Amino acid sequence: MKPSWDVDLLVVGAGPAGVAAAVMASSLRMTCVVVEAEGVGAKLRAIGALENVPGGWSTGAALTEALADDLARHQELGCVRVLSGRVVRVAGHGDRVEVGLEDGRLLTTSAAVVATGGDGARTRRPALDRGAGNQAATAAVASDSR
């Protein structure tokens, strides 16, 4: 199957870490796709304490709004796109990373960041292909060798 998207960086998850990665990539003029299954900062709305998140946010809803605003600003610059979908597989292949979505789409990139966070047993993390020579997927981060 031919990959459906080629970008400099693919970010799985649109919470604080995923948005930070996308914003940094955009500031470096890299093209970036953020794949999120539930919506920007969706898990944050349900948590009551944000002591482990920089910025002094008082509620998850306030932080979620700030994250969405940051992504929107970088989308307007044309460097970031947000794609709705659930990632089920991440595989490194030396020169590229492939990310498979639940609906069958296959995305390819030179670098990927998996920032899915967690909320206990309910979180479904993508499977990482840990084949021979697959250091990128094993670490859940792959970097371009440019």
Image: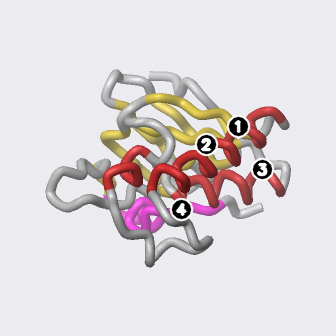
Q: Quadrant of residue 63?
A: bottom right
**Badge 1 local density, few (<14 within 10 Å), some, or many (20+)?**
some
- The figure's colour scheme reads secondary structure
Above or below, 116 relative to 100: below
Q: Give the residue displayed 70% in from the left and 48% down from the top.
A: 70
3D distance between C-alphas at marks 1 and 4:
16 Å
In contact (CB < 8 Å): disc 3 and disc 1: no
Q: Earlier in the sequence, mark 3 or mark 1?
A: 3
Q: CA distance from mark 3 to mark 1?
A: 12 Å
Q: N-terminal of the two: label 1 or label 4?
A: 4
Type of the residue with mark 2: Ala
Quarter that holds the C terminus: bottom right
Q: Which callout, 3 or 2, points at the residue further toward the start of the chain?
A: 3
Please report the residue visible at 61 percent of the width from the left and 42 percent of the height from the top. 68
Q: Closer to us: mark 4 or mark 3?
A: 4
Label ID, residue 72? 1
Would residue 131 be visible to someone looking at this image? no
Left or right? Give the position of 40 relative to 117: right
Q: Amino acid at mark 3?
A: Ser
- Name the residue type under label 1: Ala
